[in-house]
Image: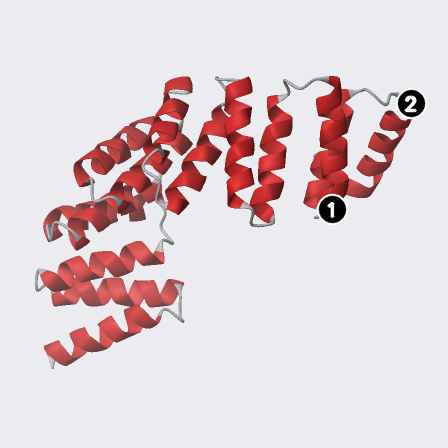
Amino acid sequence: YLLNEFEPCIKHLDVCIKYSPNHIPCKLRRSELYIHLNQYELAFNLLNDALKIDDQLHEVYWMKGQIYSEIGDVEKALSSYQTAVEVNPNFFDGYIKLGIANAALGNAIAEEYYKAAITIRPKSVEAKYNLAMYLQEKADYIGSLSLYEEILELDSTNASAAFNSGYIHLEYKQDYLTAEKWFTEAIDRLPYYHHAFFNRGLCRESMEDLDGALQDYNEALRLEPTFDAAAIAKGRVLDSKN
């Protein structure tokens, strides 16, 4: 499985189930492969068999939630993820899934699920980033900026947290100098981050640093030649300089 050699993996798992029909780990891994192959009915059958042996398997409810999510049954997906965390209140992945699903539906309880995940793993970049994005979309910029700084303390290479901090200062605060600083931080962490170059160009253009803006737009286009927004911005700056 780790080598992505699924065919021999499936054969071994099928033999495992043949000789040990009640071996739960084998059933779960075989179900995982059924899900991977979009064979959801077969996966459901094995997962339900596992629940007949032990109805307190939080991973089974989580996997059923994944299937429901894949087929677009949001309500059943939410119900399955909820059952998973009820069976295992310390199930980090379950809270993350509940947060993502509820955030997509615009349900405010998403914030509580993300916070529950952070309580379980206080140093989780994933949980903090998801919560920061949720708060950003809810216009809680103070909360999201604070979380992005926490993420950078945990992971100094995280370019996305730096970029998002810049984006908030650019788009919502119109604090172009601070935004420029954060986009530079993002570029330092990820030198081929073409969106960071483009947005830093917008900051510099807004501060009338046309030469700096032009350099950033050119770099964004070098990294991504089909970047239409950067091409338009470059044309705008060239017009202003002429």
Q: Is residue 156 above or below residue 54?
A: below
Residue shown at 11%/53% (left/top)? 174
* Three-letter residue code for mark 2: Tyr
Specify the farthest residue to the left: 208
Residue shown at 35%/50% (left/top)? 191
Q: How is the image coloured?
A: secondary structure
Q: Which mark is residue 19?
A: 2
Q: Quadrant of the C terminus?
A: bottom left
Residue shown at 36%/53% (left/top)? 193
Which of the marked residues, 2 or 1, is nearer the chain's N terminus? 2
* Three-letter residue code for mark 1: Gln
Q: Residues within 10 Å of mark 1 (few under 14, many from 20)?
A: some
Q: Does the residue at mark 2 contact the one at mark 1 (Cβ under 8 Å)? A: no
Compute the Cα span from label 2 to label 1: 23 Å
- Tag 1, which secondary structure? loop
- Tag 2, which secondary structure? helix
Residue 38 at x, y percent in the picture: 70, 48
Q: Which mark is residue 150?
A: none
Q: Is residue 178 left or right of residue 75?
A: left
Residue 148 at x, y percent in the picture: 27, 35
Residue shown at 27%/61% (left/top)? 198
Q: Is residue 206 above or below residue 37?
A: below
Q: Is residue 201 above or below residue 231?
A: above
Q: Which residue is mark 1?
A: 39
Report whether residue 44 is seen.
Answer: yes
